[in-house]
Image (cartoon, grey):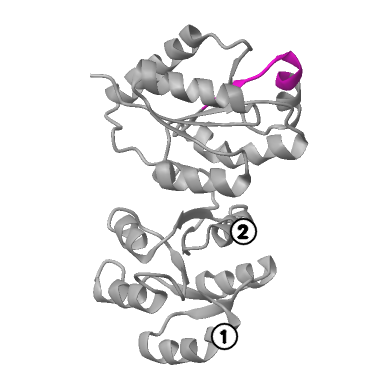
Amino acid sequence: MAFNLKVFVTGKNKRIVKDVSEHCFDDRNYITIRCEPEKEFIFEVMHSEMPNVVIICMGNENEEDITMYDMFYEAVKAGAVHIFVIADEKDKKRFMQFSRLKKVYFLSRPVSLFTLYEKLILIENELADLKQDKASFIEEYENPDDEGPFVRKKILVVDDDTQQLMQIKDYLEEFYYVTVVKSGQSALKYLSKKEVDLILLDYMMPDMDGPETLDKLRENEATADIPVIFLSGVKEKATIIETITELKPQGYVVKPAKKSELVAKIIDVLG
């Protein structure tokens, strides 16, 4: 039985975005998601929907627009996501000039759906053969095999603010393997399957806030000893001090933190 692909369609050519996403759903019964080609929206979709395929429908994207898609770099490298770019010859050359992505499938306009489906079916069969019906973008992205004497630490960032997650991820991925989740519940679920070296935990979150999440971490023998650093606003400083006394996290960083401050605090905790 074929794997039911989840296909994410974006790009500035809105007509092709609409046509391709509708055809993928109607013709192949793929799970299709489409959104505006803006960094925050794409980041949100990638981490909430975890698609197997991203189709970028180009329409005169500039250098900044193209480099935005470099956020897929590690996912592509790990084989968790396949990137298709629909472009004319001019857009194709511009994409190749500015993109860091190492593996991309180009489709020329007008789009041959037969050619697109032919490749997507191969991807479906690969996923079915590997029994990856529960594959996760985050899992594939954050746990590649590491070689050499330097072993990167794994950091889990928990924050309900997408913009904060994007910024912290940009700050830290040069030095660490960074996984991001948007709630305390998601953090606990992730930690039930994966190990991390440190948790950056937002203090104020809906449903399950930072202190409640930390309390549950401390109750679980498997996660009790993971170092935790709170991310907090200035107004929460007094209550954080009370929490530090009770739950004993390894410290806190006031948002919005500078990259140097955040990295310095992590080094202080992890060495």
Magenta extent: 83-92
Residue 40 lies within the magenta run: no
Q: Residues within 10 Å of mark 1 (few under 14, many from 20)?
A: few
Q: Residue at left 33%, top 22%?
A: 29
Quarter of the rendering containing residue 74: top right
Residue 67, image x and y in percent? 69, 38
Q: Left or right of 91: which side holds 117?
A: left
Residue 186, image x and y in percent? 35, 58
Q: Residue at left 35%, top 71%?
A: 208
Q: Nearer the viewer, residue 217 or 226?
A: 217
Res. 167 mark: 2
Task: Decide if residue 202 is in sight here.
Answer: yes
Residue corresponding to mark 1: 235
Q: Tell me the amino acid under the disc marked 2.
A: Gln
Q: Tell me the amino acid under the disc marked 1.
A: Lys
Task: Decide if residue 103 is in sight here.
Answer: no
